Image (cartoon, helix red, strand yellow):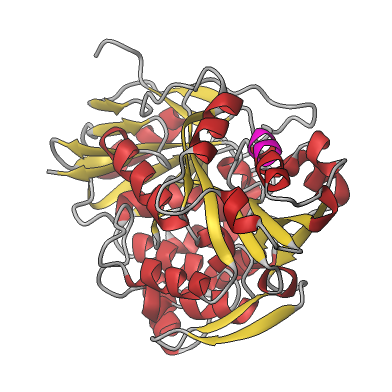
Amino acid sequence: MSAAPWVWCGSERLVVPRADAFEPPAGLERLGDLSAAVEEAIAVPSGTPRLRELARGARSVVVTIPDASRPCPSEPVLAALLDELAAGGLTDDAVTVAVGCGLHATTGPAERERLAGPSIARRVRVDDAQGIESETTDLGETSLGAPVRVAREVAGADLVCTVGVVEPHLYAGFSGGVKGVAIGCAGRETIAWTHRPTFISQPGVSVAGLRGNPFQATLREIAARTPLRWGVNLVTADGEVAAGPTGRTTPDDRGAAAVRAGDPAAVQEALAAWAAPAWLREARRRYDVVVAGVHAPKSDGLYQASRAATYLGLAARPAIAEGGLIVLAGDLPLGAGDGPGERNFFEVLAASASPADLLARGLREPLGPGGQRSFVVARVLDRFRLAVVGAAEPGFLEPLAHLGVAAFDSVDAALAAEEARLGRRASVLVVADALATVVSAR
């Protein structure tokens, strides 16, 4: 093996003592001039007229951006969008930026300024759209019966534009597209319906699948009932990430490798097709142990970091042997996470007698905000075991020990414990960035 195997653990690289196979990051390089690339994408949109044309005559425009759980270099994108809207006759006081929080924690003024960028926060109002705290508007139901409740400010705008990041997603296939509005700015009723275990267990709901995916189709139906007509999506670049002044990475640290603008679904599909060859990998066999790296800020809490385990364990052909061990590398400074969904996720897991018990419960009754993540983690724990290394305060994981979750001081220690259990040398696959690298067995 030409390079020493390693994984992300927050913003740091963690060297892995040995590996039988190593999957490095996707190798997507940062654009040299993001602002120029955004301007070019806005000038030649996909599947829709230019934003300035759609904006003519509008009195109010809302532009949605992701919260801190999905790093996005929003500031240069928003600057270009404000210029484009100005060309359509809108002044800054007609534009609001909405941080799509979903059921994640609300943000404070300093956090909103960081997410939108200081130059943007000085020009336009920046608000939260959060599924519990924000007032919502009832926009009916989708064809499958999903209630469409969307933040009132978003639903009442003359025009909505969304800024998002395209990356693999366990339910939607890929993030980005309409998701920043259909989930990020949705009310708790909409999020609860779309994320309920019986729906996310439907055939076609899978990571890296857009076509034939009922979850993605429902998001597009939700969005069609809103004023969302335009979007800018990016694929973030690989590479080293420096922590900001707070010690956590900032949204634009990774930069962007690609950007598209226009119809939200069209740009999502184009970027997913462009990046999929780098993101989707095939392993030659199944391994006893998979060491999965989780990059900041997804590594901030178990709620987000556990996505790496679900991408591995719920693949159609998992690259891990039945009963094997997933070693999750993440610093988890926020423990489970600090939003209502994150807290309930952990409480539901901790209160379950076993993974099978949680799975049965999830199919017969609501699990509350964030409960869908406890359900999919239980699906993984029903077949595999989970070890966490690198946690800042690993003691918070103790309530999950009865479910097969353990904390170790190092990857070495986790491997030693697994080999003692097996009574032989374990085969090991190392995945440097397990949230942007979806590995399946041949």
Q: Is residue 195 magenta?
A: no
Depicted 417 relative to depicted 142: above or below: above
Who's the residue at 63% across and 70% down the image?
344
Residue shown at 65%/22% (left/top)?
242
- Asked if 127 appears above or below 353 in the picture, the reply is above
> 423 left or right of 309?
left
Q: In the rendered image, which quarter contains the N terminus? A: top left
Please identify the residue farthest to the top as the structure is shown: 2
Residue at horizontal 74%, vertical 43%? 116
- Residue 226 x/y as whole percent: 58, 72
Span of residues in magenta: 76-80
Q: Where does the image place residue 329, in percent across and percent down from the top left?
A: 49, 37
Q: Position of residue 130 (x, y in %)?
A: 71, 66
Q: Is residue 312 visible?
A: yes
53 left or right of 120 in image: left
Task: Indicate the position of residue 86 as horizontal and vertical percent values.
Answer: 73, 45
Give the vertical position of 268 relative to 434 (above or below): below
Seen in the image, is 2 located left or right of residue 31? left
Pick the residue in front: 62 or 394. 62
Q: For the C terminus, which image quadrant?
A: top left
> Which residue is drawn at the image coordinates 88% and 40% (left, top)?
122
Say whether residue 423 is visible.
Answer: no
In the image shown, does 152 or 238 lie closer to the viewer?
A: 152
Picture quarter containing residue 290?
top left
